[in-house]
Image (tube, grey):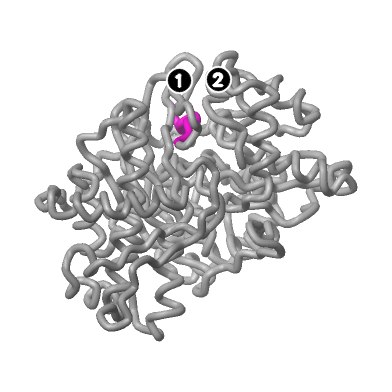
Amino acid sequence: MLLLGIDLGTSSIKVSVIDSATQRSLCTVQYPDTETTIIAEHPGWAEQSPDLWWENVQQAILKAHALKVYDPVDIGAIGIAYQMHGLVLVDKQQNVLRNSIIWCDSRAVEIGNGAFKAIGEEKCLSDLLNSPGNFTASKLAWVKQNEPANFEKVDKAMLPGDFIAMKLTGEISTSISALSEGIFWDFRKDELSKDVFRYYGFDESIIPQILPVFSEHGRLDKAIAAKLSLDPSTVVTYKSGDQPNNALSLNVLNPGEVAANGGTSGVIYGVSDELTHDEQSRINTFAHVNYTPEQKRLGVLLCINGTGILNRWVKDVVASGISYDTMNSEAAQIPVGSQGLRILPFGNGAERMLNNRNIGAHFQHIDLNLHGRPHIFRAVQEGIAFAFRYGLDIMRANGMNPSLIRAGQANMFSSELFIETFVNSCGVPLELHSNEGSIGAAIGAGIGKGEFTTENAFSNLKALKIVEPKKVSEYESVFQEWKLLLEKHL
């Protein structure tokens, strides 16, 4: 049996097909080639069109088929990974009512802060494991307050992956993991949070059917199966947010194991078996893909909105069309510390680890007689790595002390300079793998289909290399200077 994995990212869609018998990837494709636009009608807003996502998913699947390295009818199960925390609203005819308010949108911060105070900070942290903050439930409340005509038409509110599964199958479902990332879930009672629904005035009927992450979420609609040359008996058997899925793809499933990701946003994601929370809700705890009420597996997530997006911005604005490889090569010629240039890599919405502040990106201590673009390239990578370290220190204060971090050798982690800076700033060895979110989604589909279990799904997973910290003291002094600059803006 073949397994199809879909990764619904902010910038594009990736699709992979793997052979369940060998766990070997047959192909991975991306669509579109250019990055999908984020719609920002007002400062702090960020939206995308769910219908455009769906069109791009279809085109990505057809692009994979066109490689002719497999027979599409041999695909038996589909898994979906998706950008977390987005809000998709549909009416009874499953029509999209408005653009999705996506993960880096900041408009609902104050709504969430109001809920945090009204419900009670201690109760929110103990039961929800988070402040309602800027998460999906607060975004839904923003629509209720500001777009009542749209809200009245809502039949179901869902996460982005739930929407893609709906388009494939015509059925709407969600999971505890998805609901927890939206701050709809009460972990103490293992049910929809009555406190959140009561405070925001939501009816529980707005939530789709709740199913396990690894389960049958619907068979393909016959018309869609025909359009995509797939067997109509194919089932969607897995849906997960991109960061839990990244952890799954790196075999990070058990307490103490930790994964990292350096895409548009940066993430460190550790697994715990305790209902843990940060007193300031700077890091967040959600149900992991293998969470059950009987065997609790929680994902403790540090998210930094402004990471890879800054590196891309510098490439577009400063790099004059050169490649990332050239940027990395130029940056490597500059000594540690970028000769005094410091960059705070924020500016992509409110940062949870900064108490939901949106401080913007900052370039500090520019010397017009000294600094050139190679200094900027290096200072960007150092600033991003230091943001990871700053967040990791918050995780350490909350009991997450990794002895090893796993990451896919992609995005920021494809840069040798960034890897060196990350490892020595954090002081933790880094285990690098060749992995894609879409491959993780395909593996998840195989687990949901029963082709393998979480215990044997990664029998072929082998590390590319392990990078040990060797220059910790050299980077520590630069990090401390960077940290003082950050604290001046808080």
Residue type, label 2: Phe
Residue type, label 1: Leu
Label 2: which residue? Answer: 187
The stretch of residues the image draws in magenta is: 283-290
Label 1: how many residues lie within 10 Å, few (<14), some (14-19) or many (20+)? many
Label 1: which residue? Answer: 275
Q: Residue at x 19, y 44 (%)?
A: 427
In this picture, residue 255 sits left or right of residue 173 = left
Q: Position of residue 408 (x, y in %)?
A: 31, 53
Give the Cα distance between marks 2 and 1.
8 Å
- Secondary element under disc 2, as helix, strand or loop, is loop
Q: Residue at x 57, y 43 (%)?
A: 236
- Answer whether residue 10 is magenta in the image: no
Q: Earlier in the sequence, mark 2 or mark 1?
A: 2
Q: Residue at x 29, y 76 (%)?
A: 327
For the question of whether residue 54 can be seen, the reply is no
Closer to us: 186 or 52: 186
Q: Position of residue 203 (x, y in %)?
A: 80, 28
Label 2: how many residues lie within 10 Å, few (<14), some (14-19) or many (20+)? many
